[in-house]
Image: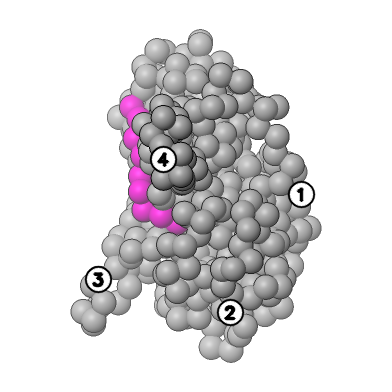
């Protein structure tokens, strides 16, 4: 069967712009969490976020696109540019219908949408941008990337919140197996504005701790919810033979296994679907649990959800059976961008033989029988399992294998 490999990475994260800057900060345990600056959050119960700092859109985005794009889409376009450059692909030299675009989304470009609705309510319809018709749309990142690079291959968008980054990559692999040479995939999100903030507060899962170093502590005794963030990763997924044929200089790894499940209805008495997703991804990759060298956990930061994930990992791998890490403690949970960034991080870990740390968590809480990695750990890595759960019961699992 056709092998899908990752040949390009583009990362825009709260603790680093660009792949190597992000990776250096992550290995050093440098966090990008801090007080919200993109809007006045002082009257809200949650006031900490992972914001992408130092990003100047005008340095990356053509002036004609500035009026029609949201902060989220600008980050996504930049990450896509970087992924293509990293892969060494000139899209003009590829088949016209050869490259697809499949990204993940949560609620669309809510910052753009909020601004235009405020203009409507306060000033009138004459002050609403014509670009509102599409700039807020959940498929806007896929559309703008496709248009910018003149890509006419199969396109799509997956809306499974935090699980979406993995689901988009699974969908990209499906297109590769159908015969398309390459797909731009992953997810970038940004909802650090009141319109994106209030629904997350309403979930009851957000942390209300004001100390950035204590606000998001998954698997810890002090776990008190999650911290939202913005950014994510775009990956260039390519058919392995196509990559070899064009002389690709870098192959980060192979997308070896993928699976998704949906949790049963509350009160059904049936277990959550995360373990089943992991088992199915392992079966899809054709490897036993013992061949997994590291798990990049979903790490919700909500005690009962952490407990369920730790239990699933113990049942699958045995007590302390595999190193488990959650580098998202340095970025926050990035909605549709989170799992894609975890996959990119896992590929970098495979490349360099080092597991990044779970920042600010000195040890797992009693009862969590997992080998939580709290400091960068050198280790020969062959296979990594990445897990993600999206609000609403979505579960996704991806196995990535080091390039041969």
Residue pointed to by mark 1: 24
- Which region of the structure is painted magenta? 154-168
Q: Residue furthest left?
A: 268
Q: Which mark is residue 65?
A: none
Query: Would residue 71 be found to the left or right of residue 272 on screen?
Result: right
Indicate which disc, 1 or 3, sits on the residue closer to the N terminus: 1
Circle 4 — which element? helix
Indicate which disc, 4 or 1, sits on the residue closer to the N terminus: 1
Where is residue 166? Give x, y as percent. 43, 49
Q: Residue at x 74, y 42 (%)?
A: 54
Q: Which mark is residue 264?
A: 3
Q: Residue at x 41, y 50 (%)?
A: 106
Q: Residue furthest front?
A: 123
Indicate which disc, 2 or 4, sits on the residue closer to the N terminus: 4
Query: Would residue 36 be found to the left or right of residue 98 on screen?
Result: right
Figure quadrant of residue 178: top left
Residue pointed to by mark 2: 223
Query: Would residue 196 be found to the left or right of residue 327 on screen?
Result: left
- Measured in 3D between alpha carbons, the distance from the residue under mark 2 to the one under mark 3, in whole angstroms, is 25 Å
Indicate the quadrant containing the C terminus: top left, top right, bottom left or bottom right.
top right
Residue pointed to by mark 4: 120
Indicate which disc, 4 or 3, sits on the residue closer to the N terminus: 4
- Measured in 3D between alpha carbons, the distance from the residue under mark 2 to the one under mark 1, in whole angstroms, is 26 Å
């Amino acid at each position: 069967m056709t092998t899908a490999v990752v040949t390009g990475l583009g990362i825009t994260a709260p603790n680093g712009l660009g792949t190597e800057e992000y990776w250096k900060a992550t290995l050093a345990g440098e966090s990008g969490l801090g007080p919200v600056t993109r809007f006045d959050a002082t009257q809200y119960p949650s006031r900490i976020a992972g914001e992408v700092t130092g990003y100047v859109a005008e340095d990356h985005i053509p002036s004609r696109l500035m009026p029609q794009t949201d902060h989220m889409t600008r980050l996504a376009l930049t990450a896509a540019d970087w992924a293509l450059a990293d892969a060494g692909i000139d899209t003009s030299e590829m088949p016209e219908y050869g490259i697809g675009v499949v990204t993940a989304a949560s609620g669309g470009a809510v910052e753009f949408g909020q601004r235009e609705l405020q203009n409507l309510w306060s000033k009138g319809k004459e002050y609403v941008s014509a670009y509102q018709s599409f700039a807020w749309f959940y498929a806007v990142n896929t559309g703008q990337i496709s248009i910018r690079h003149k890509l006419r291959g199969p396109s799509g968008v997956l809306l499974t919140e935090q699980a979406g980054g993995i689901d988009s990559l699974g969908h990209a692999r499906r297109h590769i197996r159908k015969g398309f040479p390459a797909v731009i995939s992953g997810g970038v999100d940004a909802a650090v504005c009141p319109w994106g903030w209030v629904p997350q507060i309403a979930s009851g899962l957000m942390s209300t701790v004001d100390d950035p170093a204590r606000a998001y502590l998954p698997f810890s005794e002090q776990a008190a919810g999650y911290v939202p963030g913005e950014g994510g990763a775009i990956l260039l997924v390519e058919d392995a033979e196509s990559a070899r044929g064009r002389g690709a200089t870098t192959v980060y790894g192979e997308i070896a296994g993928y699976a998704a499940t949906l949790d049963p209805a509350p009160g059904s008495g049936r277990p959550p679907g995360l373990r089943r997703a992991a088992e199915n991804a392992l079966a899809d990759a054709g490897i036993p649990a013992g061949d997994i060298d590291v798990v990049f956990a979903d790490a919700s930061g909500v005690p009962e959800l952490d407990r369920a994930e730790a239990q699933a990992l113990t049942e699958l791998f045995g007590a302390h059976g595999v190193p488990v890490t959650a580098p998202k403690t340095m970025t926050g949970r990035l909605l549709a961008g989170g799992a894609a960034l975890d996959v990119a991080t896992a590929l970098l870990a495979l490349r360099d033989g080092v597991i990044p740390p779970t920042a600010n968590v000195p040890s797992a809480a009693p009862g969590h029988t997992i080998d939580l990695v709290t400091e960068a750990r050198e280790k020969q890595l062959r296979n990594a399992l990445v897990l993600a759960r999206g609000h609403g019961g979505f579960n996704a699992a991806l196995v990535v294998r080091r390039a041969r």
